[in-house]
Image: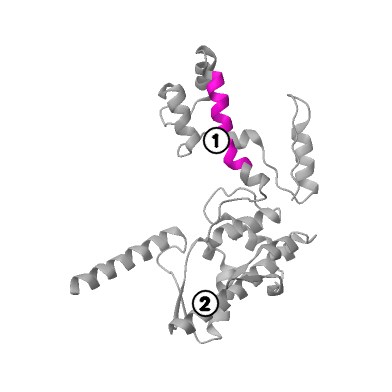
Amino acid sequence: MKIIGITGGVGAGKTQILKYIEEHYNSRIIRADEVAHLLEEPGHECYHRLIGLLGKDILDADGNIVKSAMAAKIFAEDGKAEALEKLAQEVSKPSLHLITAQANAPETTSLGRLFDAAASMFGICHVSSYEGEAPVRLQAASEGRQGQNRTDLVEVIDGHPNFVPLLLALSEYTDIQQAAADFQETLAQVLAKEVIRASERENIQKVCLSGGCCLNSLLTQRLRELLERHELQVYEGLKVPPNDGGVSLGQAWVVLMRLHSTAKE
């Protein structure tokens, strides 16, 4: 992975250069001002530390930071600018460490993050604006294409599939639509194999498909086909959404059943 930094004053042409790179090369553009804006949103560590440094006077009625009010505080009080610079260095270190270590995010077991990585590496979607956007847009990008099974590019490490070689290989495709189709077909094949193995080990015949990635109907349909070939009963939510709403309902049901079982004992 190569990292290129572009800097310059106002009107230097940074935006045009970045636009050209984004349109002509399979690359991810990270704009410092957009990152700073995200860090200032409620919920981030930086947001709370800024309030601690500058006070609640910098907030509007909805609790959002007002840049003009923040700037007024910084330049009106001695030492605030230096303190803010120190704060910026502290909150940026974790992100810089991830980038220089060639890591895009902390470790996770979420399938959604795999979709996020694929969508970004294929140049389809770099930032999700709603839950499940990456799997939905990957499906749309692959419409009309027959996905090829590329499980030969999926390594198995300590019994777990490693998709990094697959993503790297597919990101080199000049045909992004085919890359998206091959990714989804391969993913369905790997998931089906893991589910079948687990069902045999646990002697289970019923399988429920849920989670944000099941908003991708192409993946869900292919999984159903592969699992039903092995005579597994596949269930999908009809009255509840397949994303976090459905997952939360399922979690509540599991807890209820456990409480019911405990009460009987």
* Residue 13 shows up from this direction: yes
Residue 206 lies, with reference to residue 122, above or below; the image says below
Answer yes or no: do the residues labelled 2 and 1 have beta carbons within 8 Å?
no
Which corner quadrant of the image does residue 19 belong to?
top right
Rendering coords of residue 253 (x, y %): 32, 67
Q: Residue at x 52, y 61 (%)?
A: 109
Q: Look at mark 1 in the image and give the residue it sits on.
A: 91
Q: Nearer the viewer, residue 100 or 242?
A: 100
Rendering coords of residue 254 (x, y %): 33, 68
The rendered magenta stretch, by its main secondary structure, is classed as helix
Rendering coords of residue 33 (x, y %): 63, 33
Q: Residue at x 42, y 21 (%)?
A: 57
Q: Residue at x 53, y 57 (%)?
A: 108
Which corner quadrant of the image does residue 10 belong to?
top right
Q: Residue at x 75, y 63 (%)?
A: 169
Q: Look at mark 2 in the image and give the residue it sits on.
A: 195
Q: Secondary structure at mark 2?
A: helix
Residue 214 lies, with reference to residue 93, above or below; the image says below
Residue 230 lies, with reference to residue 172, above or below; the image says below
Residue 91 lies, with reference to residue 189, above or below; the image says above
Amino acid type at circle 1 is Val
Which corner quadrant of the image does residue 63 belong to?
top left
Q: How many marks?
A: 2
Q: Secondary structure at mark 1?
A: helix
- Is 48 placed left or right of 176 in the picture? left
